[in-house]
Amino acid sequence: MEAPKGVLSHLCTLEVRARSRNAQPTQRSRVKELRARVEALTARRDLLRADLRTFKDVEKRRRRLDDVRADEDEVDSEDAEKSQLLQLMARQTQLTALLHAHQVIGGYDVVSTRQGKGVCVTLATAFEGTYLDSFKLEMDLRPTLRISRHNLPPFIPLIQLGEHSDSQADPRGFLDALSTRLNAFAGRKQQLKLVKELHKSVQVMESNLLCSILVLMLTLSTKKSAVLCTVDYLDQQRCLPTSVRFHSQGEDLPDCPEWKNNCSLLMETPLHRALTAMKDMGHIV
């Protein structure tokens, strides 16, 4: 009974040994394969690390180059802006000089209309070197010279000006008289605007559309009392007043030497500049 058991046990031992011999080559082969795989992955890792270092270095250099270019572009942009500004200032000065010369010699911008049957004349206005509004009038040339359309202020006496200067025989004289009226009106209007902007303590109590009469309330710098100043522009061809009157309660200002000088100053100097001089002398607030 023990023999079979020993035989079976021996056979089992032999089978286990055989299986062990067959498994060992397979395990050795798998170990070699895994080792080769590890080496390949390690080499791949080293290559990726090298590529990453190279990429970072290139990226750092690119950023430095971009920063340098940005600084150069900023400098170039500032230089270009300055150059463009200087060119514009020079161009403005040139155009201003040309316009001033054009105004001085009495030139007018004339454009032919309706295939030569009429002309459109542009009249520019200016005050103290500042060009203001422009007015246009279209005139028919045939059969007689007459104004067909315009955008002139309604208080400009076109008929009287045409009759006085004989617009048929002397259209240039008519345009000169009209331009003088428009420039005087624009100058008075601009002075009123500057008074409101530059002299906040001066109150404009009354004015009309033609800016031919102004009533201002001034404040004395000594007694802080109010003085009414009436400025009349009876000559519509001038932007300076023809008369100035002061009114105050309890004081006879017209007889004071300093206010006589102020009266002369207002009649000989543009209104906003005369008020500035009176304030600098300490006469008004």
Image (tube, helix red, strand yellow):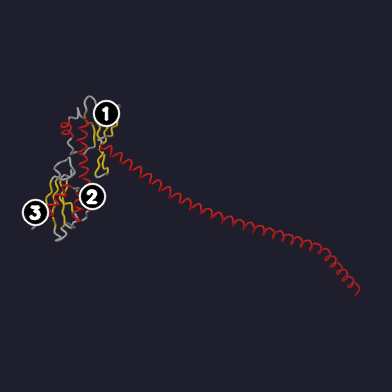
User: In front of the other: label 1 or label 3?
Assistant: 3
Mark 2 packing: few (<14 Cα in 10 Å), some, or many (20+)? some
In the rendering, at what x and y percent does residue 18 appear? 85, 65
Check disc 3 and give the amino acid type.
Asp
Residue 167: x and y, percent? 19, 30
Q: Nearer the viewer, residue 236 or 279?
A: 279
| CA separation in Å, label 2 and label 3 | 29 Å
Q: Nearer the viewer, residue 173 or 122?
A: 173
Q: Dot 1: what SS?
A: strand
Q: Quadrant of residue 282?
A: bottom left
Q: Is mark 2 in CB contact (under 8 Å) with mark 3? A: no
Residue 28 horizontal side relative to residue 183, left or right: right
Q: Amino acid at mark 1?
A: Gly
Quarter of the picture containing the C terminus is: bottom left
Q: Is residue 234 left or right of residue 9?
A: left
Query: How far is mark 1 from mark 3, CA to CA?
Result: 58 Å
The residue nearer to you, when weighing 196 against 238, is: 238
Where residue 61 sits in the image (x, y, percent)? 56, 55
User: Mark 2, mark 1: which one is toward the viewer?
Assistant: 2
**Residue sitting at the far bottom:** 2
Out of 154 and 60, give the one closest to the viewer: 60
Residue designated by label 3: 255
Task: Residue 281: give x, y in percent of width and height.
Answer: 18, 56
Between the C-alphas of marks 2 and 1, the distance is 38 Å
Mark 1 residue crowding within 10 angstroms, few (<14) / some (14–19) / many (20+): some
SS at badge 2: helix
What residue do we see at 12% from left, 46% from top?
243
| Residue at which label 2 appears | 194
Residue at image point 18% right, 38% down:
156
Residue 98 falls in image quadrant: top left
**Circle 1 is placed at which residue position?**
118
